[in-house]
Image (cartoon, rainbow, N blue to C red):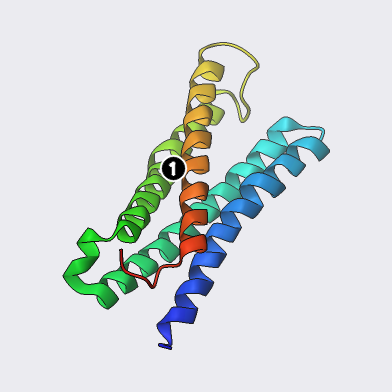
Amino acid sequence: MRFVDPLERIVLTLWVGGMWSVGYLVAPVLFSMLDSKTVAGNIAGRLFSYLGIAGLVCGGFLLVVFIWQHGISAVWSWRAWVLVTMLGVTAAGQFWILPRMDALKRLGGGHIPPAGEIAARFGALHVGSTALFVLNSMLGLLLVATGLGRQG
């Protein structure tokens, strides 16, 4: 067994486990336990931002190692394309969606009003962000279940 194999599994597990923990456990608990949805949203937003940074680092590492291990044949591997997709989704969330959501919060004075154009725009971004998050977490689960080391 190569040294990189266990390290790959650990990095993948940390990334995907972080997604599942924050997205499906921590964020819902925040919204159910805190009286202020604004505070819960701000904490969740910060956690998703940190998770995005971790995802870019972990995913970048995994993709580089995968290409290093498999060479040009990585281009034909569905696992490599899943990693590329996950990195793209993570980057879109980190550099396009989250900054726009933060800008809308600032326009609303630090929170999202219950109705109006700002609320509608924020809601649309939130729906898109949620859909991309679910896609990424499912793709991550697929990689955890099948492993990265095999070619194909």
On the image, the x and y values in percent for residue 35 come to 82, 33
Determine crowd level at label 1: few under 14, some 14-19, many 20+ residues with C-alpha closer than 10 A.
Answer: many
Among the 4 quarters of the image, the one containing residue 39: top right
Front position in the image: 74 or 68:
74
Three-letter amino acid code at the position of disc 1: Gly
> Relative to 117, is 152 above or below?
below
Q: Which residue is most to the top?
A: 116
Is residue 19 found left or right of 94 in the rendered image? right
**Which residue is pictured at 49% across the width and 66% down the height?**
12
**Which residue is pictured at 55% across the width and 66% down the height?**
13
Q: The N terminus appears in which quarter of the rendering?
A: bottom left
> Relative to 85, is 107 above or below?
above
On the image, the x and y values in percent for residue 10 come to 53, 73
Number of marks present in the image shown: 1
Residue labelled with disc 1: 93
The reply to whether residue 103 is visible in this rendering is no
The reply to whether residue 19 is visible in this rendering is yes
Is residue 150 found left or right of 39 in the rendered image? left
Front position in the image: 37 or 93:
93
Q: Which residue is most to the left?
A: 72
On the image, the x and y values in percent for residue 131 come to 49, 34
Among the 4 quarters of the image, the one containing residue 109: top right
On the image, the x and y values in percent for residue 23 come to 62, 46
**Which residue is pictured at 30% across the width and 63% down the height?**
152
Front position in the image: 70 or 86:
70
> Relative to 126, is 95 above or below?
below
**Which residue is pictured at 45% across the width and 67% down the height?**
147
SS at badge 1: helix
